[in-house]
């Protein structure tokens, strides 16, 4: 794991050094696709399509990972009665949370057709960074509260601390440049947290879940998790 961290860090640093060696800071700031502009300068227009192919493959891999992880967030939330019951079902043969994956699709379409895609990306980026910070913060907490747990893999604590530190710095820089978006993001997170805590104190979810449980599932190729 340490070797992979070092290799990826060196690769990213060398990539940025290469960008600044070929392009000016003004070109990097104004360009919507720095890698494509770099490829045009270095290997020419004819071969620069290779970079676009690499970007497409990278985006496809990112989409695959996001579909794999985010849909399971819906799945676990529904299993804990925080989301509708139907999202806690899995496919009979493939054993995947198909309902949660299907729900993610219209959300993605709405994001694409929302108009100003960069504003949406900034909002989602802030949410993702806050989620990453909380995810990393839970690792040392569980090590302290439940040290007797036997895990198949244990992430080094220093890597979690370093990741949290860098993520917090990036988030603070984003808050400095886009304070309104960060403020709205934090407000939404606190509203969701308040709703969750209120739902735990005043448990009225049984009535809501009972209504959702009447959804006709006999025609769906799902089974309960």
Image (spheres, helix red, strand yellow):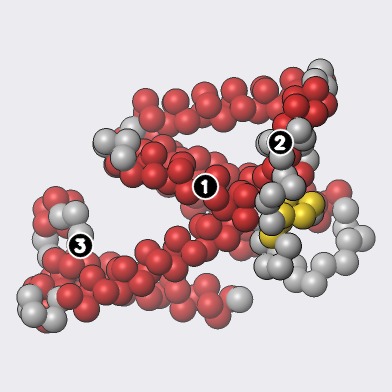
28 displayed left or right of 194: left
Q: Residue 31: name its quadrant.
A: bottom left
Q: Is residue 91 visible?
A: yes
- The residue closer to the viewer here, 92 or 84, is 92
Could you classify mark 2 by the number of other residues whose Cα lies within 10 Å: few (under 14), some (14-19), or many (20 or more)? few
Residue furthest to the right in view is 148
- The residue closer to the viewer here, 170 or 39, is 39
C-alpha span from label 1 to label 2: 19 Å
Could you classify mark 1 by the number of other residues whose Cα lies within 10 Å: few (under 14), some (14-19), or many (20 or more)? some
Quadrant for the C terminus, please.
bottom right
N-term-proximal mark, 3 vs 2: 3
Q: Residue 28: name its quadrant.
A: bottom left
The residue indicated by pointer 3 is 34
Badge nearest the viewer, 3 or 2: 2
- 45 is higher (above) or lower (below) than 30: below
Residue 195 in picture, x, y percent from top left: 67, 23
- 102 is higher (above) or lower (below) than 202: below
The residue indicated by pointer 2 is 215
Q: SS at mark 1?
A: helix
Q: SS at mark 3?
A: helix
Residue 199 in picture, x, y percent from top left: 76, 23
The residue indicated by pointer 1 is 104
C-alpha span from label 3 to label 2: 49 Å
Could you classify mark 3 by the number of other residues whose Cα lies within 10 Å: few (under 14), some (14-19), or many (20 or more)? some
- The residue closer to the viewer here, 16 or 70, is 70
Residue plotted at (74% across, 20% down): 198
N-term-proximal mark, 1 vs 2: 1
Residue plotted at (80% across, 28% down): 210
Badge nearest the viewer, 3 or 1: 1
Residue plotted at (11% across, 53% down): 26
- 11 is higher (above) or lower (below) than 162: below
Residue 97 in picture, x, y percent from top left: 66, 56
């Amino acid at each position: 794991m340490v070797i992979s961290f070092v290799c990826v860090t060196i690769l990213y640093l060398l990539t940025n050094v290469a960008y600044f060696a070929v392009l000016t800071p003004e070109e990097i700031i104004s360009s919507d696709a720095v890698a494509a502009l770099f490829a045009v300068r270095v290997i020419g227009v004819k071969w620069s399509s290779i970079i676009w192919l690499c970007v497409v493959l990278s985006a496809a891999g990112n989409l695959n990972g996001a579909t794999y992880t985010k849909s399971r967030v819906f799945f676990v939330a529904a299993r804990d009665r925080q989301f509708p019951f139907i999202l806690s079902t899995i496919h009979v043969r493939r054993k995947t949370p198909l309902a949660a994956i299907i729900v993610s699709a219209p959300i993605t379409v709405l994001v694409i057709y929302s108009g100003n895609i960069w504003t949406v990306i900034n909002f989602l980026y802030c949410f993702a960074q806050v989620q990453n910070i909380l995810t990393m913060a839970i690792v040392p907490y569980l090590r302290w509260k439940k040290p007797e747990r036997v895990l198949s893999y244990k992430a080094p604590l220093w890597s979690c601390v370093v990741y949290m530190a860098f993520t917090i710095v990036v988030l603070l820089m984003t808050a400095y440049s886009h304070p309104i978006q960060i403020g709205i993001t934090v407000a939404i997170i606190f509203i969701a947290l308040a709703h969750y805590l209120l739902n735990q104190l005043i448990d009225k979810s049984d009535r809501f879940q009972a209504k959702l449980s009447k959804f006709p599932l006999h025609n769906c190729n799902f089974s309960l998790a």
